[in-house]
Amino acid sequence: MPNTRVVPAHECPLSVAVDSEDVAVPTDGGRYDVFLGSRTRHAVYWQEAPSQVRRCMWFFKSEKDNSYHPYTEELSDLIEAAYKEAVTSNEWNKKLQFPSGEVIKLHNPK
């Protein structure tokens, strides 16, 4: 996904309603607006195709270009829930199998 952008959380004011599609959060010095409801980023001063935005805490490293990419929001939520369970129960080295066939192994952060 070459048009995927990661928007830093500090650029999103806490007073913004996440589910409101008409709320625009300015990013990149005001050159782009991110519409949180539709998860899209639009150029303000020129014509450009909108790009996808994700709220994500979990990333994977691509083998093709050796860079990090965010997981989908749904998969990220599943990983986060499994991680919280591992932290709470102190049970590590679990393998998470996802419908896509992907396997993730949780390791103790120490």
Image: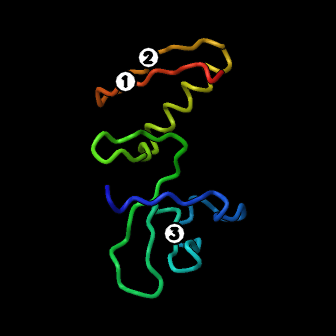
Residue at the limit of the structure toward the right, as seen here: 15
* Quarter of the image that includes the C terminus: top right
Residue picked out by circle 3: 34
Disc 1 to disc 2, how far (Cα)? 6 Å
Residue picked out by circle 2: 95
Q: Secondary structure at mark 1?
A: strand
Residue at 56% over, 65% down: 20
Is residue 57 or residue 99 the one in the foreground?
A: 57
Disc 3 to disc 2, how far (Cα)? 35 Å
Q: Is residue 52 above or below residue 75?
A: below
Residue picked out by circle 1: 103
Select label 3 or label 2 by which is in front: 2
* Residue type for callout 2: Lys
Is residue 24 or residue 68 the one in the foreground?
A: 68
Q: Position of residue 106 (x, y in %)?
A: 51, 21
* Residue type for callout 3: Val
Residue at 64% over, 62% down: 17
Is residue 23 or residue 1 the one in the foreground?
A: 1
Q: Residues within 10 Å of mark 1 (few under 14, many from 20)?
A: few
Image quarter of residue 38: bottom left
